[in-house]
Structures are given as C-alpha cells and as structure tokens.
C-alpha cells in the first residue's frame, strides 16, 4: 500500500475522484474507505461544494419551525411570543436562536406581560399533554396479547392488592373485590373467567355517595359487566359529609362496584396460596 503522503500529492486528481464518487451517490464514509483517506480535513477539502446525496440526509421535521423562530427573533420577539406563535417548547426555541442577539426589552404593562405568560404556559401544558399521550399510547401498544399465565399472575396480584382478605380478628374466606376503576373491574372479571368461575356465581353491589347520580351509576356498572339485573343487589349509599372535601365528584363519579363470588372459600384459599408462592419467588430473587 502506498504511503498516505503519496496519495495526497496530486490533490486535484484526488479531488476529481472524490467528486465523481460523490456524484454517484456515495456517502463520506464510503468515499473515505474507497480512497483510503482517513484525514477529515483533507476529505472536507476534497468534497467542498459537493452536496451530500439525498439518501444520507436526515429528515428534520422542525426545519421550517426553526427558520421561522429565527426570523421572529430577529424581529425582536421574545421566547414567550415565539412559543405562542409556533406552538413549540421554549427549550427548542432557545437552542435555535441562541446565536442571535437578544432583542431590546420593551416595556409592557403588568396585564400584557401576564397575558403573554399565560398563553405561553397554555402552550407548554398542551405540549406536555401531547407528550404524555404519546408515551401512554406507546406503553399501551407495547403490551400486546397477554398469555393465560400472565393474566393469571396479574389477577393474583390484583386481588391481593384490592380484594378482601381474611384477618385474625375477622376470619372469613370469601372472594370479594371492590374498586372504582372500570378497567380494574374488567381485568378482575377476565381473571375469574380464566379460573373457570361461571357468571351465575357472581353478585354485584354498587357503593356510592348519596349525593352522586345513583341511577346513572347503577346503569353504568350493569352495562360494563353485562350482568343480569338479578345479579345486582341493593345499592349501598354513603352519607354525604359536608365537612369532607371530596374530589370524586362530577359526571365521571360512579362510586365503586363490589364483585362477590358465591361459594368461594376454596377459591380464596387458592388465592392466598398463589400469593404466598409469588412472595417466596420474590424473596428468592432478592436473596
């Protein structure tokens, strides 16, 4: 192999080769390896003025926003105004325009400054919510289809966290589950079906504050579980205490649903055993 210095002796001839390779669509790395040029400064000089092929360009969806942000900054706009106008984060704006001179501050009334700040905060909150929804959706999509064993283990943990448990002072072995989250109820019912618990063994009760929409809550839970009205017992009403500052109010408040499994002593014992087995395995893993 020739010494590197000999390769760079005839610079123009080497440049012709580099340009020709560039115009055939080769990347910098491909040209470097083809011509054995490992000095970036020389490679830059050889390719000076030659645009990279389209396939090596990284798409930048925010290029237009960046250009517009710089234009507005040069017009004297503040970060807050640019954020409201373009709907992008202040951190991005700062990165795009940090090399530009700071505009002269204009005196504004307190009301004007407050209004601009509020609009900027509204944009920030919207961006945060959009990011939250993207993260949530990506996590949702990552779950995919659960196996029977995954659902089984999930149900055991779910019951032991939210279900009724036998206590030394109140020994009772019955599977009773209560929750206000419709999703929790649906997962629990799917788990019971996996265990072979037939629908005729299920009984439901609604627990709700007397100040809530009792009839609406009863309809909601009945439609959710798809149960027969006969499977629903009398609704339990909780007295409304004016001294209690309850947050669970409004149209989405539907109280809680109690799900009882009839003749469930054997099921409860198995749940207790399953959970004990999971604890043993957890201890083994942390030992």
Image (cartoon, helix red, strand yellow):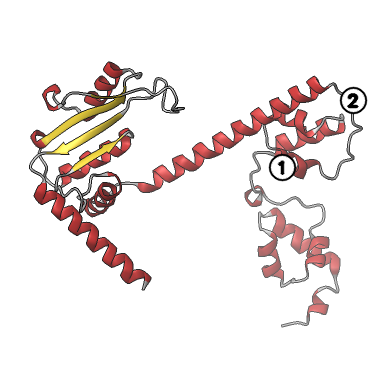
Instruction: Note whether 217 is above or below 11 in the view shown.
Output: above
Q: Secondary structure at mark 1?
A: helix
Residue bearing mark 1: 91
Work out how far the residue at label 2 is from the one at label 1, CA to CA, in angstroms. Answer: 24 Å
The correct choice, above or below, for 277 with respect to 5 in the image is above
Q: Nearer the viewer, residue 121 or 61?
A: 121
Locate residue 14 relative to residue 193 in the image: left or right: right
Q: Which mark is residue 231?
A: none
Image quadrant where one finds the N terminus: bottom right
Asked whether, in this view, residue 274 is left or right of residue 139, the answer is left
Q: Residues within 10 Å of mark 2 (few under 14, many from 20)?
A: few
Residue on which the image places disc 2: 107
Q: Please name the residue shown 74% across and 38% down the image.
A: 66
106 vs 226, left or right, is right
Residue sitting at x 46%, y 27%? 245
Q: Residue at x 83, y 29 (%)?
A: 77
User: How many residues crowd around disc 1 within 10 Å: few (fewer than 14), some, or many (20 or more)?
Assistant: few
- The kind of secondary structure element at disc 2 is loop
Residue 244 drawn at (x, y percent)? 44, 27
Front residue (pair 209, 248): 209
Earlier in the chain: of badge 2 and badge 1, it is 1
Q: Nearer the viewer, mark 2 or mark 1?
A: 2
The quadrant in which the C terminus is found is bottom left
Asked if the residue under mark 1 is in contact with the one under mark 2, i.e. CB atoms within 8 Å, the reply is: no
- Rendered image quadrant of residue 204: top left
Residue 252 locus on image (x, y percent): 39, 24
Return the x and y of residue 209 as percentages of the image width and height.
Answer: 33, 24
In the shown orientation, is residue 152 left or right of residue 243?
Answer: left
Q: Position of residue 150 (x, y in %)?
A: 27, 53
């Amino acid at each position: 192999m020739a010494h590197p210095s000999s390769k760079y002796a005839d610079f123009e001839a080497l440049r012709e080769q580099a340009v020709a390779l560039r115009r055939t669509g080769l990347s910098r790395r491909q040209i470097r390896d083809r011509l054995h040029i490992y000095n970036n400064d020389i490679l830059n000089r050889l390719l000076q003025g030659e645009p990279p092929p389209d396939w090596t360009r990284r798409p930048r969806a925010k290029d237009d926003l960046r250009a517009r942000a710089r234009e507005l900054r040069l017009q004297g706009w503040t970060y807050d105004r640019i954020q409201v106008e373009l709907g992008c984060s202040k951190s991005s704006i700062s990165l795009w325009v940090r090399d530009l001179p700071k505009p002269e501050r204009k005196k504004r009334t307190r009301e004007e400054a407050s209004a601009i700040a509020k609009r900027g905060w509204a944009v920030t909150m919207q961006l945060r919510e959009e990011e939250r929804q993207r993260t949530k959706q990506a996590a949702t999509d990552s779950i995919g289809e659960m196996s029977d064993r995954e659902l089984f283990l999930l149900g055991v943990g779910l019951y032991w966290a939210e279900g009724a448990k036998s206590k030394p002072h109140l020994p009772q072995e019955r599977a009773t589950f209560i929750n206000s989250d419709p999703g929790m109820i649906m997962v629990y019912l799917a788990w019971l079906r996996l265990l072979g618990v037939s629908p005729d063994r299920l009984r439901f009760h609604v627990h709700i504050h007397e100040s809530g929409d009792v009839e609406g809550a009863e309809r909601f839970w009945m439609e959710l579980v798809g149960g027969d009205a006969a499977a629903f017992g009398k609704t339990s009403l909780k007295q409304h205490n004016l001294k209690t500052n309850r947050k669970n109010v409004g149209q989405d408040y539907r109280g809680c649903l109690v799900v009882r499994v009839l003749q469930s002593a054997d099921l409860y014992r198995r749940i207790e055993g399953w959970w004990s087995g999971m604890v043993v395995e957890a201890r083994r893993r942390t030992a």
